[in-house]
Image: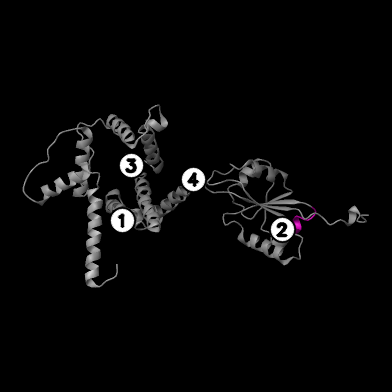
């Protein structure tokens, strides 16, 4: 027989909901479970009176108290079965969560149910917004960065591209990730400088929008009605749509003449071969013509002459270091 009366039953411990949001998502765009928890809560607390979500919560009729309770105070506020929602600040409330963990570990306190409820989520690519914000601040406040121009940064773009290639060829995953970031920085930096141009400004969104449009247009087999089942057919689509876009007079148009010589020779040979032209290689005296012939032969065989020469040069470097008695 149960002799416990309703009056003597222990009070329900209640519930604590830690509501987290992403600053990379527009304020007010919360998940439906988050809105349900907020409307059903007995109290909603936030330590940051300037939290970007607060105006939207109040507009929705939710009363938010600006308070920073201790773990003990929060547990007490839940006594009697109450639900308290804590809108987390950007730091995620580590002091509060650590305090709750200590209380739970002590075994001396009847703990409320604890729930971590993400109210908004980062989408893939969301950290790019952080990079843009950081670049904005650096451009405004750094004595060096604030003075840079497209021309002044050009050499860094070349250096970072070569370092990326080296990381790829070395197979170092950590270096690859870092060098990709350095290349990305060059893109964001140039786009930030471009915003300040008085005559023809553009932003990183314009850059991204342009490449999105180009990719969609040049992949009709993905976004349109064309079909492609082999890499060769994909390349054919790419070249055909690119020719329509550029309306070039020559297959050599658009080839940057400032690139390394072997790469330049291979690119010219590739364009000639792809266009089905019969253009004999020029003849002349000197190593340059011999290198041109080697680069054209490598391209025809599907070999990147620049990569092949770098590989051979690294082997030569290792041989030199070995002769010197220096470790690789």
**26 w.r.t. 241: above or below:** below
The residue located at (61%, 45%) in the rendering is 55
Q: Nearer the viewer, residue 109 or 132?
A: 109
Which circle, 3 or 1, is nearer the viewer?
1
What separation in Å lies between label 3 and label 2 (alpha carbons)? 55 Å
User: Would residue 316 appear left or right of 82 to someone viewing this image?
Assistant: left
- Residue 56 appears in which quarter of the rendering? top right
Q: Residues within 10 Å of mark 1 (few under 14, many from 20)?
A: some
Q: Nearer the viewer, residue 248 or 96?
A: 248
Magenta range is 75-80
Q: Which residue is mark 3?
A: 198
Which of the numbered marks, if any, corresponds to residue 166? 1
Check if mark 2's residue and mark 1's residue have beta carbons within 8 Å: no
**185 w.r.t. 321: above or below:** above
Which circle, 4 or 1, is nearer the viewer?
1
Which circle, 4 or 2, is nearer the viewer?
4
Which of the numbered marks, if any, corresponds to residue 74? 2
Q: Which residue is mark 4?
A: 124
Q: Residues within 10 Å of mark 4 (few under 14, many from 20)?
A: few
User: Would residue 160 appear left or right of 79 to someone viewing this image?
Assistant: left
Q: Residues within 10 Å of mark 3 (few under 14, many from 20)?
A: few
The residue located at (72%, 50%) in the rendering is 43
Looking at the image, tell me whether mark 4 or mark 3 is earlier in sequence order: 4
Check if mark 4's residue and mark 1's residue have beta carbons within 8 Å: no
Check if mark 4's residue and mark 2's residue have beta carbons within 8 Å: no
What separation in Å lies between label 4 and label 1 (alpha carbons)? 27 Å
């Amino acid at each position: 027989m149960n002799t416990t009366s309703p009056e003597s039953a222990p009070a329900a411990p209640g519930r604590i909901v830690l509501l987290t949001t992403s600053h990379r998502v527009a304020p007010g765009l919360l998940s439906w479970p988050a809105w349900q928890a907020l409307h059903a809560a007995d109290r909603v607390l936030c330590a940051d009176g300037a939290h970007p979500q607060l105006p939207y919560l109040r507009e929705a009729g939710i009363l938010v108290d600006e308070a920073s309770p201790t773990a003990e105070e929060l547990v007490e506020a839940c006594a009697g079965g109450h639900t308290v929602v804590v809108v987390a600040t950007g730091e995620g409330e580590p002091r509060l969560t650590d305090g709750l963990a200590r209380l739970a570990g002590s075994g001396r306190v009847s703990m409320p149910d604890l729930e971590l409820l993400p109210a908004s989520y980062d989408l893939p690519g969301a950290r790019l917004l952080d990079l843009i914000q950081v670049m904005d601040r650096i451009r405004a406040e750094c004595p060096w960065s604030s003075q840079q121009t497209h021309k002044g940064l050009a050499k860094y773009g070349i250096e970072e591209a070569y370092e990326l290639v080296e990381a790829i060829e070395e197979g170092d995953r950590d270096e690859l990730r870092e060098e990709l970031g350095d290349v990305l920085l060059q893109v964001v930096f140039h786009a930030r400088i471009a915003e300040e141009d008085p005559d023809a400004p553009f932003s990183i969104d314009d850059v991204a929008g342009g490449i999105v449009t180009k990719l969609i247009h040049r992949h009709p087999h993905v976004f349109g009605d064309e079909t492609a089942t082999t890499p060769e057919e994909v390349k054919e689509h790419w070249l055909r749509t690119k020719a329509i876009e550029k309306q070039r007079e020559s297959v050599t148009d658009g080839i940057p003449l400032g690139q390394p010589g072997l790469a330049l020779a291979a690119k010219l040979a590739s364009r000639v071969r792809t266009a089905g032209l019969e253009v004999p290689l020029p003849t002349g005296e000197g190593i340059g013509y011999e290198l041109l012939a080697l680069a054209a032969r490598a391209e025809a065989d599907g070999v990147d002459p620049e990569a092949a020469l770098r590989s051979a040069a690294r082997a030569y470097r290792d041989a030199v270091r070995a002769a010197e008695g220096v470790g690789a």
